[in-house]
């Protein structure tokens, strides 16, 4: 674990992989709930880092964290969400060809994968889901689309993501869900929060 | 009847109707705290001290919503009598065409038009009204977030803005000192890291010595610069990581971008350093073309 100062109010804690980042994030949230971190601190997980922003005394916390043991996360602790998906995305055939399988198998493989929200970003409620093995990572589209419809399920690099609302995007689209990913009247507004376990369920038509 | 010293006259709520929206006028408060992990930018007033001052002048709590104008000001008609204050970039303030004080509480009679003039110099003005702009909050804030589209849309001609009940009497103030916008050049302290090691020693020397200019592509998301490109020490891509206000991200074109209130919560370009929060108000008032220098500080 490397603890890097980021300005005068924040620390960026860097670990080796997304699994460690997940465990570190869970531990930091636990510490905040237990009063071991200020209540107002923002904890922002990402691929292999967790950002702590809004700190009064980052230096003292950095010293503490460098000696802190991060426990492993019990998988069953995390919330879990199932997203019904119609696998009929415009890039399904391309993904099938990149994976070296036929179109039906893309849905099958994707729907039996256990995903987890590594972090959110890009847009409110947009979650970066990890779970696909490296052999199934695909590059982004060379030319991003100017409008990807809300609910589109896409792949890029190690991640699967679902567009919370219509926006530009370069991910390869394999399907679409009717689930509401973002709703400001809900608490939390995001359906997929960091750490949440996610499964996709293939459906014939979006119910 | 014209606007004059407020003299404790209470505002009465009602509505402000936008007569002239200006280049970009948005509702802003102190931002949306606590949702960065869901991809929600902080947002909020870019020149936070000016926003707080405007609120204090009219007797509002500092987190009441104000209007943030950009370069060309704006004009609103008050349906009922209100007390307002304009701060931030200096500008002419007029009530039904008659000059009124800037940086002080002034009373706007019912039906009168308050005109916030063009910024001279600077970029962003703040119009506070006693009672605050009372649009519906989203995730605990009334701020317009231009990156993710949360909060009210930027003002348009005819937009009707509800005004809240004034919290208390308008304080008597003779003069409210405020730092002016940067003139001549913008000097930004820069605390190096966390990714300064992604750049060559020559690039860091360039960053310390070169004069950049504020790009006209700057906005609420970031202050973009034009100037010598910063060369990276190696190839490779940085996995996305959390971003803070004031982070100076260096995209592939090598020109530093200073992240302001509507910045994305995560990003994949290396952050060479961070401008401390106290210096960001000046960045928010820096006009396109203004020279920018970075003063490098180590931890």
Image: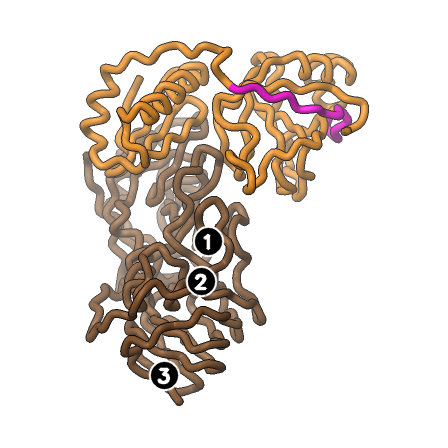
Chain colours: A orange, B brown
C-alpha gap between disc 3 and disc 2: 20 Å
Point 73% across, 24% down: residue: A94
Question: In 3D space, how far apart are the residues under numbered discs 1 and 2 (Cα atoms)?
Answer: 8 Å
Residue A26 covered by magenta stretch: no
Q: Which mark is residue B3?
A: 3
Name the N-terminal-most of marks 3 and 1.
Answer: 3
Q: Residues within 10 Å of mark 1 (few under 14, many from 20)?
A: many
Q: CA distance from mark 3 to mark 1?
A: 28 Å
Label 3 secondary element: loop
Which residue shows up at 29% across the image and 30% down it? A11
- Rendered view: B155 above or below B95: above
Q: What is the count of numbered marks?
A: 3
Name the disc covering residue B38, or none. Answer: none
Q: Report whether B9 appears left or right of B189.
A: right
Return the x and y of residue B255 as percentages of the image width and height. Answer: 39, 45
Q: Earlier in the sequence, mark 1 or mark 2?
A: 2
Viewport quadrant of the N terminus of chain B: bottom left
Q: Which residue is mark 1?
A: B142
The residue carrying mark 2 is: B133
Res B116 visible: yes
Report if the CB atoms under discs 1 and 2 are less than 8 Å apart.
yes
Q: Quick one: which residue is furthest to the right in this view?
A: A204
Location of residue A2 with respect to B200 vertically, above or below: above
**Position in image of residue A92 (x %, y %):** 74, 24
Q: Residue at x 53, y 56 (%)?
A: B152
Q: Which residues, given as a range, are shown in magenta?
A: A79-91
**Secondary structure at numbered mark 2:** loop
Position of residue B57 measured from the top left corner of the image (x, y, whole percent): 28, 68
For the residues beneath circles 3 and 1, the answer to whether they share a chain is: yes
What chain letter is assigned to the residue under label 1? Answer: B
Q: Are marks 3 and 2 in contact (CB under 8 Å)?
A: no
């Amino acid at each position: 674990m490397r603890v890097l100062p980021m300005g005068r109010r924040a620390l960026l804690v860097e670990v080796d992989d997304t699994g460690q980042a997940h465990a570190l994030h869970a531990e930091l949230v636990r510490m905040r709930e237990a009063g071991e971190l200020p209540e107002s601190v923002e904890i922002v997980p990402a691929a292999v880092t967790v950002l702590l922003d809004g700190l009064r005394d980052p230096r003292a916390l950095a010293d503490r964290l460098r000696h802190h043991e991060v426990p492993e996360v019990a998988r069953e602790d995390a919330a879990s969400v199932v997203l019904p998906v119609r696998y009929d995305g415009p890039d399904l055939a391309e993904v099938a060809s990149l994976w070296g399988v036929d179109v039906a198998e893309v849905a099958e493989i994707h729907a039996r994968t256990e995903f987890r929200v590594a972090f959110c970003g890009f847009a409110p409620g947009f979650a970066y889901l990890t779970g696909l093995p490296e052999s199934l990572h695909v590059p982004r589209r060379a030319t991003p689309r100017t409008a990807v419809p809300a609910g589109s399920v896409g792949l890029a690099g190690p991640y699967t993501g679902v567009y919370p609302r219509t926006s530009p995007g370069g991910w390869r689209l394999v399907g679409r869900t009717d689930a509401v990913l973002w709703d400001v009247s809900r608490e939390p507004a995001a359906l997929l929060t960091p750490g949440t376990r996610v499964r996709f369920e293939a459906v014939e038509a979006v119910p | 009847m014209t606007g004059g010293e407020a003299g404790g006259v209470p505002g009465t709520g009602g509505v402000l109707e936008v007569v002239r929206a200006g280049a970009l006028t948005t509702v802003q408060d102190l931002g949306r705290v606590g949702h960065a992990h869901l991809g929600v930018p902080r947002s909020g007033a870019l020149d936070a001290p000016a926003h707080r001052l405007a609120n204090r002048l009219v007797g509002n709590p500092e987190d009441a919503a104000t209007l943030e104008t950009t370069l060309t000001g704006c004009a609103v008609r008050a349906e009922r009598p209100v007390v307002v204050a304009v701060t931030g970039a200096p500008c002419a303030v007029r009530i039904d065409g008659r000059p009124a004080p800037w940086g002080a509480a002034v009373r706007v009679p019912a039906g009168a038009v308050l005109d916030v003039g063009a910024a001279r110099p600077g970029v962003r003005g703040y119009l506070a009204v006693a009672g605050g702009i009372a649009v519906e909050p989203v995730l605990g804030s009334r701020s317009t977030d231009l990156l993710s589209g949360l909060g009210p849309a930027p003002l348009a001609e005819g937009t009707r803005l509800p005004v809240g009940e004034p919290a208390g009497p308008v304080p008597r103030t003779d003069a409210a000192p405020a730092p002016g916008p940067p003139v001549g050049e913008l000097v930004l302290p820069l605390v190096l890291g966390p990714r300064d090691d992604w750049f060559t020693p020559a690039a860091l020397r360039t960053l310390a010595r070169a004069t950049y200019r504020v790009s006209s592509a700057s906005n609420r998301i970031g202050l973009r610069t034009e100037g010598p490109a910063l060369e990276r020490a190696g190839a490779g891509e940085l996995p996305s990581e959390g971003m803070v206000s004031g982070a100076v991200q260096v995209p592939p074109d090598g020109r530093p971008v200073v992240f302001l209130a509507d910045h994305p919560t995560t990003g994949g370009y290396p952050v060479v350093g961070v401008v401390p929060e106290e210096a960001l108000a000046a960045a928010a008032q820096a006009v396109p073309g203004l020279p920018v220098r970075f003063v490098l500080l180590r931890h």
